[in-house]
Image (cartoon, rainbow, N blue to C red):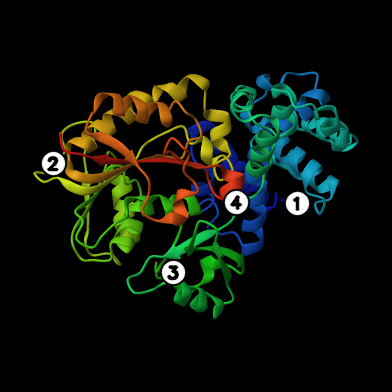
Amino acid sequence: MPVSAARLAAFRILLRVEAEDSYASELLHSSLTASLSPDDLRLATELVFGTLRQRRLLDYRLASCSAKALSLLDAEVLTALRLGAYQLQFLERVPGRAAVYESVELVKAARLKSATGFVNAILRKLARDDLANTLKAFEAPTATALSIRYSHPEWLVERWLERYGSAKVIRLLEHNNRPPQLHCRSNSPGLDSDALSAMLARQSVRCEAHLLSNDILKVTEGDLYKTTLFRDRRIAVQDAGSQVVPYLLDLAPSDACLDLCAGVGGKTAQMARLKGSASPLFATDLHWHRLQIARRLHSGNWKNLNWVACDATRALPFRRCFDKILVDAPCSGTGTLQRHPEIRWRLQPERIKEFQPLQLSLLDTAFQYLKVGGTLVYSTCSLEPEENEAVVEAFLNHHPTAALILPAMPSLQRWFSPTRFFNLFPPDAESDGFFAAIIRKATA
């Protein structure tokens, strides 16, 4: 029998994630899954994200069953083992014999027949051992125990324990290992959240308002991707935390606006929606291919968007200054480990501080192009103070006309610390983790 289409797709995606630093979420919506049925796509998605989220625990379990170090295995063999182990340990509806058989077949398909006996023996041995025994052995709130039990890098767990304490860290780790909620918003002029919710209900999709804003919809039932609203790009799928960051700019129709690190334009389009006027809104990014995606996704609905590829650490190609500027800076992404579990295994501790010079440079550039009296929002999807508070404090120390302010919307002020920093802790906010600071430019 051939390998099932879902498992083969998951196998290929996991190999790409490992070898090319690709993102699983993107590959699951690529040509690798184009021919899958809806049921097979759901299974492939479960296998990919589940295997990535539980990787350290799976490796610990596999290593206990193998006399050979996992680091010595071919990538295809290790990936097949992880896929099989995830099914055996976490998917009760998958028969154990099917999980073992399909993993062996994946190794054969990868032309590594000599490893089939090894894979078969390891997974059969693992199937006889109870996962509960392993979990019970790692109940202590130490960095080592928590990193294995909840499958996160030990160095990262240790950092978080020092800052948050064990109870809060366990909540964060549990959150990161659950599938993320699906959030959406209007991406079309004149379509408010009440009308959008009603239109989705008529297409068998139920939503409710998110705790961060009534305009952010959380999908509770139905397939959003099958709706005409999604196909016509009248709605945007975007994490709740990402959606709320542009609110901090307190946009007015007459504001001259700039999104300095636009990426694929999710926050840019949200800025256009909140601004609610036809006056130009400029968006820059270093990578033109990202802006091409942004233009395809958003320019059909928002005619005032202008996409400019440039290096924002240098002088910008504008002769004007702006009333409102968003700097959603590149960062480690530790607030998005639920949505992007592969980041756990790529990120190294030294990388966190390496983002600081770039983040400060982007802030410096943005401030040069900010009008006196204007507002700048610096944001990241990181939980790490080196990329957040430390960057803003260093910036303020070198810019005496810059000052932190609180948002105009009272409902958002609850997410600000006494030191005027915006922090969304994922389990509390039911979103990705985000940091932001609102900076006002005063007269000299």
Q: Position of residue 227 (x, y in %)?
A: 50, 72
Q: What mark, if any, has residue 317 been given in the picture? A: 2
Lower position in the chain sequence, tag 2 or tag 3: 3
Label whose residue precedes the other's in the sequence (4 or 3): 4
Crowding at dot 4, Cα within 10 Å, few <14 / some 14-19 / many 20+, comes out as: some
Q: Residue furthest left?
A: 319
Q: Nearer the viewer, residue 169 or 409?
A: 409
Which is in the foreground here, disc 3 or disc 1?
3
Which residue corresponds to mark 3? Answer: 231
- Residue receiving disc 4: 180
As measured in the structure, the alpha-carbon distance from the residue carrying label 4 to the one carrying label 1 is: 34 Å
Type of amino acid under label 4: Pro
Q: Is residue 108 visible?
A: no
Q: Earlier in the sequence, mark 4 or mark 2?
A: 4
Q: Which residue is mark 1?
A: 1
Label 3: how many residues lie within 10 Å, few (<14), some (14-19) or many (20+)?
A: few
Q: Pick whichever of labels 3 and 1 is earlier in the sequence.
A: 1
Report crowding for label 1: few under 14, some 14 to 19, many 20 or more residues within 10 A (C-alpha).
few
In front: label 4 or label 1: 4
Q: CA distance from mark 4 to mark 2?
A: 39 Å
Q: Nearer the viewer, mark 4 or mark 3?
A: 4
Q: Amino acid at mark 1?
A: Met
- The picture places residue 308, in percent across and down from the top left corner, at 21, 47
The amino acid pointed to by label 2 is Pro
